[in-house]
Amino acid sequence: MTAVQFGVLGPLAVSTDAGEPVVVPGTKVRALLADLLTNRNQVVSADRLVDDLWGDDAPANPAGALQVRVSQLRKALNDAEPGARELVESRPPGYLLRVDAIDADRFDELAHSSDVDRLTEALGLWRGEAYADVADAEFVRAEATRLAEQRLAVHERLAEARLARGEHDLVAADLVELVARHPLREGLRAVQLRALYAAGRQTEALDSYAELRDRLAEELGLDPGPELVALHRRILEQDAGLSAPPKAAMIRNSLPAQLDELVGREEALAELQALVTRQRLVTLVGPGGVGKTRLATETARAQSFPDGVQLVELAPLPAGDARVAEQVLSALGAYEAAGTNLSPADRVVTTLRHRQLLLVLDNCEHVIEPVAELVARLLRDVPGVSVLATSREPLGLTGELLWEVPPLPVPDDGDLDAVRRSAAARLFVARAAAQQRGFRVDHQTAAAVAQLCRRLDGLPLALELAATRVRALGVRGVVDRLDDRFRLLTTAQRDVPPRQRTLTAVIGWSWDLLDETDQVVLARLAVFPDGCTPEAAEHVCQTDLDALARLVDRSLVVLDDSGPAPRYRLLESVAAFCLGRLADADEVRARHAVYYTELAERADPGLRGADQQRWLTLLDAELANLRSALVHGGGLRLAVALSWYWFLRGRLTEARRALAVPGDPEQEARAAPWRVGFALSQGQAIAPDDVRAAVAAHPNGHAAWFAANAVIENSDLALASELLPTAADPWTEAAVLTSLAHIAHANGDQTTLERTATRSAALFADIGDRWGRLRATEWVGGLADMRGEHERAAALHREGLRWAEELALWPQVCAELSWLAWLAVQTRDYALGRELAERAYGLAVEQGSPGALIFAEMSLGLAARRDGKLDLAVTHLSRLAELGRGESQPALYLPMILVELGYAVELGGDPDAALALHIEAFETAEAMATMRDTVGPLEGMASAVRSPEVAARLLGAAAAVRLAAQAPAAPAERDDTDRVTERLRAELGPERFDALVAEGAKLSPSEARAQL
């Protein structure tokens, strides 16, 4: 996304990514920007914008006035940052401002922290009152009020956080002005009372309370709230809990010094810092290398326990060692006195009984039983002690709060802004820059950094190990060597524990703690390239849910329940480690291939019924497993089962590649129509006899219809009609009817089109197949367009677009966008037509669909021609004309493209060349025997021919064909005939013109053509 920064925490401010201010001219334009910012990333209707900007004083043409302000805003943005005009999108029924960087969102992000630095940064974003220069406008009032309230809440949180750090004197001083401005705000007053009391100013605290009580009574007739009353009582009783913490608490801890910045854990740190003050046992769990130790130590560093924080490192103990209590005593500096006979655990309890401290137990997983036993005793017998533990599995105690430390978020793609925002990328870049001065993420390195972060699953230790290699290999070199990650990801840093010096050691530490049975299950799980359902794991790994649960508890398997069904996943590095230890790989992969082949065969009929969306979602989730099964035993049988899924998802190339593998005779026969259909869909020329042979191999199935339907895209309507199968079931009947509707549309046969499209839609509705309803509705909309019912056609296609987007049927999304673009052009909304066609074209490129590309470019060409952009129109239309001429059968779209190109050439000043194009269009339509397609060429010839008499007769003949075909001209088409009509009436006179038109109406299209 184009980098533009917006500011609303003060007067409206706009700047480029480089910090250069952007001037937004005019009061109304700034008001428009403010309105769009308050509703950022949402569509605001044009009617609402007009009402917000002008109220009851709207201009005579409000839509036009609004469009002018939108254009001015787009220009201001684009002048400062090329491409930024695209941030303001036209979206029915109004406009949308895409906002990626705004100070209000950054403030929201920081405001939920309890960290002093982040809260201070949040308040530092403010430059005055929110939306200061448009604050009187009704449309910003709610947003400005919300932000102001949140600002006060942050002031309160910051004061609380500073009190916890012992800054009571400074807090008391800083709150004087704020309390004076908000004298009735009880939360603010409570913080002030605590700060004054902790600073030794009890009298002032009581006076402040008395002042608030009196003002509430006088101004509102209220008493202070119960929390404030309770605080007042504690002050009167001189509650020791309100006193400033002893100075020793600030320094009495055993945490290591902070050597570098903790990157990407700001929200986690804020949440944990709050949790530790409320929860006596918090256990950070997660896989090795995810950063549990660092997060725990930074969480502990911010705590203010009276007796400090004590870190106990358990990694030096051997696995299963029972001497955990001794390790705690050593960290506490508690030594055994002569003559004592207490157990180590009793001595820990005795030592801590009267202390209030936070005990951080690091790396508990290999001594989990003795740790759990000791912690249970502390929680029961030592109420002043809280425990923060790190482990790869839970302690399993009552009252334990598990906090799973996730890997750092990784960028979805190589977009520079997305990479810069990604926590994983920020960590990698920070560590790489420490190794190689000047390393930074930019347009050249962003894609490689994003790929590296994804391949390493956002695992902090792996990212830090990779960063040490950048100096020698460069970031691209590191990425290229990730297939050998266990040799690559090592470090020579001497102050790092041995278990963290290599990626192998990190994972091996957890592997060695498993028993042999669980090791086998974990290794087998590695054959699933993108996780699996519990059922798949049980079948392929020959295990049970108890074993899987143990692996989840030990942080070696991730349970992902974010989707419609839970899935077990391995981090990529864990999977690579386990594959090297999979002893029965051939047998496991064979079970995997059988399981997913049977799943695809169950899914195939489900993709043609009421459960279509559920099966699509399921196959989407299993796509990586299905691809793996294809190359490990699924073969042609699985490829055939997946063919319809691939078509629905627009994965034509993948389908052809999978279907190319050989199979047994039955599989070959079933695959033949699919192979031909996909090849035709991608524009490959196939001889009619080869198509017939492929369909004959499996004539009565869904695949036969698929191949026959694909023939229509190659414009051979006769062959398609010949090959369409006899309906063997309701779905095939409905599908064949959509093909017949397509053919009827191409032939201009409205009667057949109405019958077949309507019947198909009804059948698909009964079956519950939403894709089928989409296809049928497409041709119902095509009929409405043909009859000039453009509003109805657009409504049908908008509904189709919504269905297609809900199902993520991207080929159909592309088709519906192209239809809507076509209709926008026909109704003279050329800007919307271009916008929709560009979206369709982009999707078509992604899908690799030649037919979709042609449909989208057609609207781009028409919109450009009818909007007067003749050079652009000629470029698009000439390319389409060459494509259409180059097909074995004349393309169905060719006559119309030649007509449009002829108009562009004529308007460009070359009527003779235009006439030749219109004649070619007529002859092409005549060869196709489609009467409706002769209308455009006749009207085009009338615009280019030099004889006004001949031109008038041609217009008469065209009008007669339109009447006979029930194909009224669209508004945009009328613009062309109106232009020609006006010229001819001026040249011939109205009476002579009308007489010649009447003569032409008696001529057949061929007879009219013969006038030239």
Image (cartoon, rainbow, N blue to C red):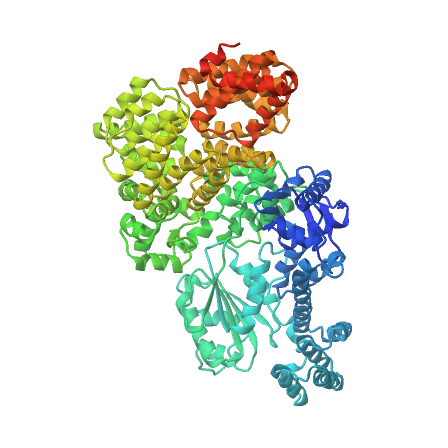
Residue lying at 37% horizontally and 54% vertically, measured from the top left? 565
Q: Quadrant of the N terminus?
A: top right
Residue lying at 50% horizontally and 31% vertically, measured from the top left? 845
Q: Is residue 510 above or below residue 930?
A: below
Name the image quarter holding residue 734.
Answer: top left
Q: Is residue 368 above or below residue 736?
A: below
Q: Is residue 574 left or right of residue 494?
A: left
Name the image quarter holding residue 892.
Answer: top left
Q: Position of residue 182 (x, y in %)?
A: 73, 74
Name the image quarter holding residue 832.
Answer: top right
Residue at the far front: name it. Answer: 991
Residue 581 seen? no
Q: Position of residue 532 (x, y in %)?
A: 35, 49
Q: Position of residue 604 (x, y in %)?
A: 30, 41
Q: Is residue 274 left or right of residue 283?
A: right
Residue 451 seen? yes
Residue lying at 63% horizontally and 60% vertically, measured from the top left? 108
Tally of numbered discs: 0
Q: Is residue 206 left or right of residue 857?
A: right
Q: Position of residue 248 (x, y in %)?
A: 66, 75
Comparing 813 with 984, the one in front is 984
